[in-house]
Amino acid sequence: MKISERLKEICEFISPEDRIIDIGCDHALLDIYLCEQYKDLKVIASDIHEGALNNAIKNVKNHNLIDRISLRLGDGLTIVNADEFDTILISGMGFYTIKDILSNEPKMVNVKKIVVQSNTDVVKLRKFIIKLGFKIVNEKLVKDNDIIYTIIEFGLGKEKYTYDEIYFGPIILKNKDELFYEYYSKKLLKYENLLLQIPKYEIKSKLHHKKLIKIIRRALTSTENKVDEKKEK
Ligand SMILES: C[S@@+](CC[C@H](N)C(=O)[O-])C[C@H]1O[C@@H](n2cnc3c(N)ncnc32)[C@H](O)[C@@H]1O
């Protein structure tokens, strides 16, 4: 089955022993692809919209996977019991929706892995999930249809990160692949232009953009990962 490059890369973060809930499954193509890769895998796939879930049901039936993909209609983790899963997969949503979904504490008690691709505010997302008691285990920039996405895997545990590591992602910063240079060169240009447009009296915003420009320039020009001395608490 053909799926997008983004979804394919997300699947690379899944292991056959994960007990997955895919929240916001939409068409469920990712879940079908996963089940075709791992013959013993069972997945819970949910969506808040009836239309999306109906599409998922149709696709899952067409692939004869109705006994392995449990399809559920509803909001976030409300449609699942805490003992039914240990891995959360969320992709293609904005940060605030993801934050709301993961804020369901009683349903999070058995979670040991979160694989997430947010369409917005990846820095806020890192901070938020780390505060829930997770650390970054793996992450990657992925290009699909000319858009660069960030996929992050969190695992249970505590780790201290520098400002730069939270901003870029510790593993992405360490690896600095081609996509890193492409993505952050564009961001740098965007922030430099924005800085010129911010009025003088908006001091806080000017300082914020200057700081971002400084750390992005530093990351793009230094050959090694220049790590801040000051660790974030
Ligand atoms: C843009 S699609 C992404 C689909 C797929 N995960 C992907 O990455 O291609 C977002 C899906 O999330 C669903 N959704 C949004 N908020 C949700 C929530 N709180 N709980 C469950 N599903 C939600 C939407 O109905 C939609 O089908």
Image: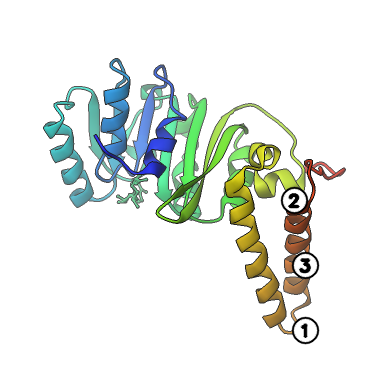
Residue nearest the observer in this picture, 127 or 167: 167
Residue nearest the observer in this picture, 56 or 108: 56
* SS for dot 2: helix
> Percent position (x, y) of residue 206?
75, 73
231 left or right of 93? right
Q: Which mark is residue 200?
A: 1
Instruction: Identify the residue at horizontal 43%, vertical 21% (top origin).
Output: 15
Instruction: Identify the residue at horizontal 57%, vertical 50% (top origin).
Output: 122
**Depth-wise, is mark 2 or mark 1 nearer the camera?**
2
**Depth-wise, is mark 1 or mark 3 nearer the camera?**
3
Instruction: Identify the residue at horizontal 46%, vertical 55% (top origin).
Output: 147
Q: Which mark is residue 136?
A: none
Residue type at the position of mark 1: Lys
Q: Which residue is mark 2?
A: 219
* Colour scheme of the rendered structure: rainbow
**Depth-wise, is mark 2 or mark 3 nearer the camera?**
2
* SS for dot 1: loop
70 left or right of 91? left
Instruction: Choose the circle earlier in sequence order: 2 or 1.
Output: 1
Q: Quadrant of the C terminus?
A: top right
Residue type at the position of mark 2: Ala
> Percent position (x, y) of residue 213?
74, 63
